[in-house]
Image: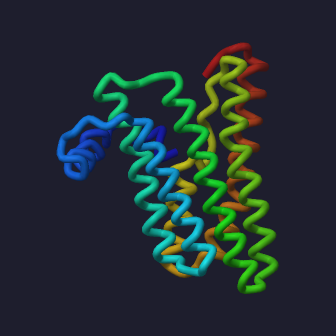
């Protein structure tokens, strides 16, 4: 929802942060993607050791790099098929690493219900982009649904910084699967109509 409404309209702000951090030097966007995944790994370690705020900061920095790589590629003519592929693969690793850290966090505390919810949420987080990829492989647009990646990150960040991580995971466990269902229904409707929307 956020992605579809905002799109690339914030690129100039993101590039402003990039120029401040890198002093105007042109960096390969793929390197920024790797930096983002590295920060997600730091978030995984921090959350696993119950350092939720530190994990939230690392996840926020990871999200910032994820915004930067795309904005930089679009505005410096460095958009490549491999770059898009690499970014997507690293995003999946980042998402699931963070969820693994959350699972370990709840396991350490012996909160079995939240462990189950984390596992269910992880399945939804993995299937959402897969559903889109399968639809796009059939040349059907499929970016519909409540929780795309920005919304999921926002929910996780709110949970990490507020201390109500269990509630955030429950929201993800429910609405990631709602999003998958929305994409399945959308794809079925489009294929029935024989049009690409």
Q: How does the figure colour the protein chain or chains?
A: rainbow
Q: Quadrant of the C terminus?
A: top right
Residue 12 lies, in percent from the top left, at: 25, 40
Q: Going 57% across and 46% down the picture, which residue do you hit?
A: 91
Residue 89 lies, in percent from the top left, at: 61, 39
Left or right, 12 with respect to 170, comes to left
Q: Going 73% across and 28% down the picture, which residue do you hit?
A: 134
- The image quarter in which residue 26 lies: top left
Which one is in front, 69 or 155? 69
Image: 74 above or below 130:
above
Q: Going 64% across and 31% down the picture, which residue do you hit?
A: 142
Q: Going 60% across and 75% down the picture, which residue do you hit?
A: 165
- The image quarter in which residue 44 lies: bottom right
Left or right, 115 with respect to 57, comes to right
Which one is in front, 137 or 5? 137
Which one is in front, 112 or 30? 30
Residue 172 lies, in percent from the top left, at: 66, 61
Residue 133 lies, in percent from the top left, at: 68, 30
Which one is in front, 136 or 68? 68
Image: 187 above or below 152:
above
């Amino acid at each position: 929802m956020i992605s579809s409404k905002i799109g690339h309209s914030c690129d100039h702000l993101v590039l402003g942060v990039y120029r401040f951090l890198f002093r105007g030097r042109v960096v390969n966007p793929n390197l920024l993607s790797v930096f983002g995944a590295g920060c997600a790994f730091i978030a995984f370690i921090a959350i696993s050791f119950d350092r939720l705020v530190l994990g939230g900061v690392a996840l926020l920095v990871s999200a910032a790099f994820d915004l930067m790589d795309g904005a930089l590629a679009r505005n410096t003519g460095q958009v490549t098929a491999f770059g898009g592929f690499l970014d997507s693969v690293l995003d999946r690793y980042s998402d699931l690493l963070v969820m693994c850290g959350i699972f370990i966090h709840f396991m350490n505390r012996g909160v079995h219900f939240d462990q189950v919810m984390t596992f269910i949420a992880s399945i939804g987080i993995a299937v959402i982009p897969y559903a889109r990829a399968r639809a796009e492989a059939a040349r059907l647009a499929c970016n519909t649904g409540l929780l795309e990646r920005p919304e999921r990150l926002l929910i996780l960040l709110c949970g990490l910084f507020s201390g109500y991580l269990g509630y955030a995971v429950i929201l993800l466990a429910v609405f990631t699967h709602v999003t998958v269902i929305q994409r399945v229904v959308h794809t079925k409707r489009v294929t029935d109509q024989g049009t690409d929307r």
